Amino acid sequence: MSDWLPATPIPRLRELTPARVGLGRTGVSLETRDLLEFQRAHALARDAVHSRLEAASLAASLRRISTLDVLRLHSEAPDRAAYLQRPDLGRRLDQPSRDRLGALPREAYELVIVVADGLSALAAERHAFPLLARLLPALEGWRIAPLCVAEQGRVALGDEIGGALEVQLSVVLIGERPGLSAPDSLGAYITWAPRPGRTDAERNCISNIRAEGLSYDRAVTQLGFYLAEARRRRLTGVALKEESHQIGGD
């Protein structure tokens, strides 16, 4: 017999969170329904980690919503296996990508936006396009470098890209580590004066951008705040997070 107690407040809690709370039990085991759902979620998370970014399709989509050039770049990780086993390779551009950036004319760019697969290519494919469709019109007046779509990339790859382009700020939109309730969560990392060697303490992060999490409109509002404040104060990171309460609500 199941130990589930309908009189508990668990059903109400389940309305408030996708977390697995108050799971029913049969003896010492989970109910079959919950066990199968867990296995399904675990499989989706594994698939998200190992999936490959459809970079050509994403780049083509981005060209439809912007007059900016779109560059396809690649880290030093040659494939997914190397990317997962050698995080350091995902933080550095391969030589063809360095050459591609080096061939660009030098301009006084303020901002570069990088879309990277990270640990969930699914997140980048699902959410980068609709987010940028809302963000780019809100950045009117900014001098923006070509949009970059980076394969096998980690957050710090934006530091090398930003350094090569000599921008003031970088935004890296990247697939976050999948969880058992969110295999497609997109993160946005904002870095002032991006250069190789920057630390996570020198960045600001907006997390869980997806339909069931932080909405695109809310994410654009937060990004607008951080970018404006970063340009005004010439910094990002821990010091800027202290003023995050200034961001308005939906």
Image (tube, helix red, strand yellow):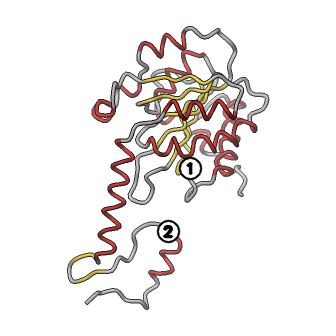
Q: Residue 87 carries which label?
A: none
Label 2 crowd (10 A; few <14 / some 14-19 / many >=20): few
Cα–Cα span, label 1 and label 2:
16 Å
* Residue sitting at x 70%, y 40%: 224
* Residue 28 location (% of width, % of height): 20, 79
- In which quadrant is the N terminus drawn? bottom left
Q: Residue 209 carries which label?
A: 1
* Residue sitting at x 59%, y 33%: 171
Which secondary structure lies at badge 2? loop
* Residue sitting at x 48%, y 75%: 14
Q: How many marks?
A: 2
Q: Which of 191 and 164 is in front in this view?
A: 164
The furthest residue to the right:
141
* Residue sitting at x 43%, y 66%: 19
- Looking at the rendering, which quadrant does residue 82 occupy? top left
* Residue 20 location (% of width, % of height): 39, 69
Question: Relative to 35, is 238 on the left or the right?
Answer: right
Label 1 crowd (10 A; few <14 / some 14-19 / many >=20): many
For residue 167, above or below residue 38? above
Contact, mark 1 vs mark 2 (Cβ under 8 Å): no
**Mark 2: amino acid:** Thr
Q: Quickly name the residue at label 2.
A: 17
The furthest residue to the left:
28
- Looking at the rendering, which quadrant does residue 154 occupy? top left
Question: Relative to 157, is 145 on the left or the right?
Answer: right
* Residue 62 location (% of width, % of height): 62, 33
* Residue 2 location (% of width, % of height): 28, 87
**Mark 1: amino acid:** Ile
